[in-house]
Amino acid sequence: MSNATALDHTVAAEAGSQEFLVFSLGEEEYAIDILKVQEIRGYDNVTRIANAPEFIKGVANLRGVIVPIVDLRIKFRLAKAEYDDQTVVIVVNIADRVVGIVVDRVSDVMTLTAEQRKPAPEFGVSLPLDYIHGLGNLDDRMLVLVDIEKLLTSEEMALVEEASE
Amino acid sequence: MDITDFYDTFFEEADELLAEMESHLLELDVDNPDQERLNAIFRAAHSIKGGAGTFGFEALQRTTHLLENLLDYTRRGELALRRDIVDTFLEAKDMLNDQLDAYRQGGEPDPEALERICETLRRLALEEIGEEADVEAHAPPPAADAVAPSPPPEPAGEAASAAGGRFEVVLLGVDDKDRELLIEELGQLGDIETRDGDAERYRVTLSSSLSADDIEAVMCFIAEPEQLEIKALDAAPAASEPPAVAAAAATTSEAGTNEAAPNAAEASPAPGDAKADGARSAPPAEKAPAKAAKSNESTSIRVPVTKVDQIINLVGELIITQSMLNQVAEDSETLDDGALVNGLNLLQRTARDLQEAVMSVRMVPMDYVFSRFPRLVRDLAGKLDKDVELVTEGKSTELDKGLTERIIDPLTHLVRNSLDHGIETPERREAAGKPRTGKLTLSAQHQGGNILIEVIDDGAGLNREKLLAKARSSGLVVSDSMSDDEVWQLIFAPGFSTAEEVSDVSGRGVGMDVVKRNIQAMGGHVEILSQPGQGTTTRIVLPLTLAILDGMSIRVGKETFILPVSAVVESLQPAAGDLYAMAGDDTLLKVREDYLPVVAVHQAMDVAGAITEATRAIAVIVQGEGRRYALLVDELVGQQQVVVKNLETNYRKVPGVSAATILGDGSVALILDVADLHRLSQSKKENRIFENRSQPLEKEVEPS
């Protein structure tokens, strides 16, 4: 895996290439634009919020800032959502907001060239096409490129007040 | 450095000067004006003009120039003040504000408005003085005003045209070091011909191609304006100081008034001649107010609120880290380590002090709010033909900056109401045996962790019958047996107005409900006291700050919530006999004579593992939006001040929750919104009845 990363970095300067943070939800691998990622931290000390959708785990304190924590595994209806040492929260910056997303594992940072990015098929993944940029093709791995901003600001995520924005 | 770097300083200074000018104008007694006040107004105009000239803000300079000349006539008693003249001055001041704003935004002021105000000022000068206001020179002002607080009106604009010549520069009470510097500076400006004197009074004769104003401007970097006297020597002999007078002046102290000088000045030639001769008696001290503002700046700085908030955030974090350290020390076996414990205690104390100090940065005096009302009251009273005296009390009472900005609108509304509906016309007041002049009082005082702001008028008071009749006609449910307090509360109902006719001041029926909503949004409440014929008092109670809150931590199940202490009335252990089940899942708790609805926090907030049996729980009696009810919790943990964090910054409004805070262990606790919690509980009960199913609880396995 690290070999692949090293190789990719050498072609990073190539036009149309873009860096992605790769994480896994269950058996599937997803990737989001690295520029949206603020930091990665452990899953810890999350305060539950009553009357919120199940996938909103609550809010956590990120150095004095109150940040909502969303579990994408529950949102994508994965078989199980367990919280262990490996469980991490990717803190992303979207639409002037800071949101934490819970994933099973963060694997690495990869550069995908334009050729390696394919349009998404009509079916096969557990989230609507609206929130998918496309698929990343890397040797034998397939990455689902998620439009994290669109996903998190969507109405069904209930993270943003409907009336505003 | 670019000159534009100084723009902001000038804008701020000019803002302050204009505010000062306005307050002096408002306090001016038209029939018997205070000389000091007139001088202060004049000085403000003059300083702004000077700055405007320096920075090339032409419109501003022209307007201030015209205004300044008129002010000069008034301060010398040649123009008798009238109310309408003061109005014109105020209007000109507003125009200056507009111009300043335009320049601040990098634009040019509206040329039409400029012409209009210039025309008004010119006409005023023509009518009152019989002279063009912008005629170059009038009788030169007393030169010795340098020491008195009234500087003469030698405008900078003229200075440029009358540049060059020989000058006598007198340094008053300048110490040796500064004097050397000043003389060096002067040497760069022109040729020094003679120099002599002592520290008290040092005279330099200089020939230079610059104007007296320019020379002064340079010197002001080193010396205070009142330490300088600059005179043109090539002038007609009458305009320059006779040596005898100078000698006399030399014997007086630095600040002593030079009695002889005014005579010398008055003896100077008529305007036309003065111009022809190029005679200029240079203005020695008009930079004084600007200078004073500058020296104030060295003791205060302007900082964006976001920076302060950032510091507050960081200090909050520091305190959390500090309590975490304490926790670790207590848990481990290091308690015997005296040095560590001492160090931690010290850290705790310093951190708390730091937090308090940082919080106090956000506080500003109520004067910030009150200072805008004299003008409003004056204008409104004039419009309504009423005589009103405004009294403000507790101007130094401090309040969070964020709140002062939000309280202005509601207060403005209340003041308008008092003037329009409260205080009667002078005729009516006389008929009622009251003094013709009505009194409106604005007061502020601290009351525990709150600030109490009152708007008091001695007007007619609220009319119970009229209010009731109006309420009926607008479809509100009222009865004649309602208490006065309840009747007064009616005016906060949406769309309610009792004004017999709608005026352009108030009475459109929007407003009082907005006032109430705004104040509640700030965590405060408003009440009205009224006596027919005696007047009306509106009291606003607000928390001192929105950034911190006196909180009561409560535990429900494994979760901790914060209740605002201000909402808590009392707490008690409910006895089985005091609980009454009602139809539809409701429970009432009898507390002394009252039956209060019961809301269980674990139900409203879906907490698992909480005490469900009311008699084993604790009932906290709370009050929100005028409604009292009992809140069932597992345990009261304690009281503490918490830093309020907005949930909506990154998330959204949560029902039943007003905000969040960070506890000592770094975790987040939700601050309950007492009024909203009741609504939430009601709607959940309704849902339960209709859907007959309970909300799903936690399903996932979480590490504890």
Image: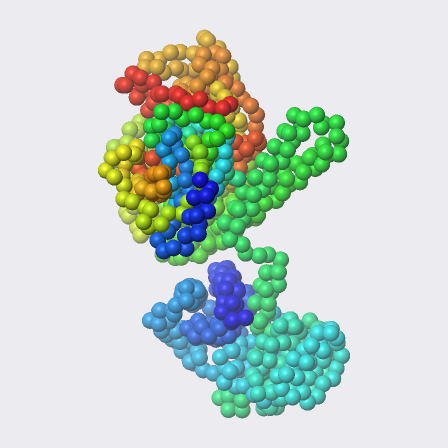
Q: Nearer the viewer, residue A55 or B10?
A: A55
Q: Nearer the viewer, residue A94 or B682?
A: A94
Which quarter of the figure has residue A71? Answer: top left
> How many numbered badges does the structure rendering display?
0
Q: Is residue B528 visible?
A: no
The residue shown at (30%, 21%) is B687
x, y percent for residue B629: 43, 22
x, y percent for residue A29: 37, 36
Outermost residue to the top:
B577
x, y percent for residue B65: 46, 75
Q: Nearer the viewer, residue B289 or A11?
A: A11
Seen in the picture, residue B141 relative to B329 is either above or below; the reply is: below
Which quarter of the figure has residue B165? Answer: bottom right
Q: Is residue B692 visible?
A: yes
The residue shown at (57%, 67%) is B289
Q: Name the side, left or right, on which B687 lies relative to B264.
A: left
Outermost residue to the left:
A122
Which quarter of the figure has residue A80? Answer: top left
The residue shown at (41%, 64%) is B105
Q: Name the side, left or right, on which B174 lies relative to B44.
A: right
Q: How is the image coloured?
A: rainbow
The residue shown at (52%, 46%) is B309
Q: Name the side, left or right, on which B435 lies relative to B320.
A: left
x, y percent for residue B294: 59, 64
Q: Nearer the viewer, residue B69 or B589?
A: B589
Seen in the picture, residue A61 relative to B697 is either above or below; the reply is: below
Image quadrant in which the N terminus of chain B is located: bottom right
